[in-house]
Image (spheres, rainbow, N blue to C red):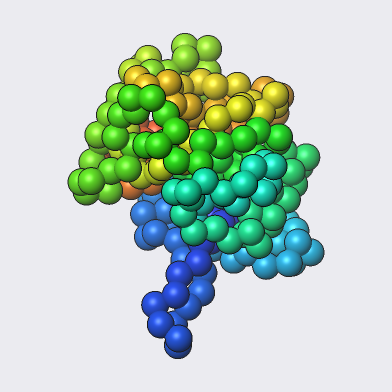
Amino acid sequence: MKKPIIGITGAYVKHNQHMEGVYIHQDYHKAVAANGGIPIILPFTTPETNKEMLQLCDGIILSGGEDVDPQFYSQDPHLHLGATIPERDLVEMETVKYVLENNIPLLAICRGIQILNVALGGTLIQDIPSQVTEPIQHSQLVDRGRDTHWVTISKESKLYQIFGSEKIRVNSLHHQAIDKVSDELRVVARSADGIVEAVEYIHPTTFTVGVQWHPESMTSTNVLMNQLFSEFIKSSTKVLN
């Protein structure tokens, strides 16, 4: 059986004037490879080239990274907005539309869930600590792979089918989150302070899930998070048959 090719959208990093370019944390491609997929990194480029790259892929991961530019949901920048790359936002919003139109399995992680929501008409909380009343700690201060808070999962969801539990522990590496939810998405998980932790597409024809945490960094020690990747890769494999 041919292994599915999983495209992982790339962030950007600049070490110095001689070293800069596309970047993803190694946990992404390790989690994909460990579950039977072939990971490739997708740099943000022109919409035309991006479409050609997407045509090579059997599944897509929208990865974490920079904040989403609020111009794309008609807001001005909050005082605590972090770095943004509008060029990446535009390409990834087009990626969302392409994968949904072509029934390509999608796993949207952290920034990815935010881009998914914005691409479909939703908005974001630009800075949880200053905009949410009594929030829990969402910007993790310990090892990336360690779980730090609880998430409640809807029983009527794909995630519940995967996890088999209404409460799970997750890691947390973000200060932005979904605010107004797109009409094309439904919330399937929240943290104790009400922050949206997972969404699913309301017209599913294939795997289309967004999570606010970083399951790729928990797969080596957490059976549930590895199962999430396993199910995503299986869904991508079906595209080949």
Residue farthest along the left direction in this orientation: 142
At 45% from the left and 70% from the top, the residue drawn is: 13
Q: Is residue 120 in sight in this rendering? A: yes
Residue farthest along the top direction in this orientation: 155
In the displayed structure image, the side of residue 74 where residue 20 appears, left or right: left
At 27% from the left and 48% from the top, the residue drawn is: 144
User: In the rendered image of this protein, does residue 75 appear above or below residue 3?
Assistant: above
Task: Where is residue 17? Give x, y as percent.
Answer: 45, 86
Task: Where is residue 143? Give x, y as percent.
Answer: 22, 48
Task: Where is residue 191? Give x, y as percent.
Answer: 38, 23
At 47% from the left and 11% from the top, the residue drawn is: 155
User: In the rendered image of this protein, does residue 223 appear above or below residue 95?
Assistant: above
Residue farthest along the bottom direction in this orientation: 18
In the displayed structure image, the side of residue 173 where residue 54 appears, left or right: right
Q: State the count of labels.
A: 0
Q: Quadrant of residue 45?
A: bottom right
Task: Where is residue 43? Give x, y as percent.
Answer: 59, 66
At 68% from the left and 57% from the top, the residue drawn is: 91
In the displayed structure image, the side of residue 189 where residue 95 appears, left or right: right
Quadrant of the drawing holding the C terminus: top right
Q: Quadrant of residue 175?
A: top left
Name the residue nearer the viewer: 5 or 125.
125
Name the residue nearer the viewer: 59 or 65.
65
Q: Is residue 220 in sight in this rendering? A: no
User: In the rendered image of this protein, does residue 1 appear above or below residue 185?
Assistant: below
In the displayed structure image, the side of residue 134 where residue 3 appears, left or right: right
Name the residue nearer the viewer: 80 or 86.
80
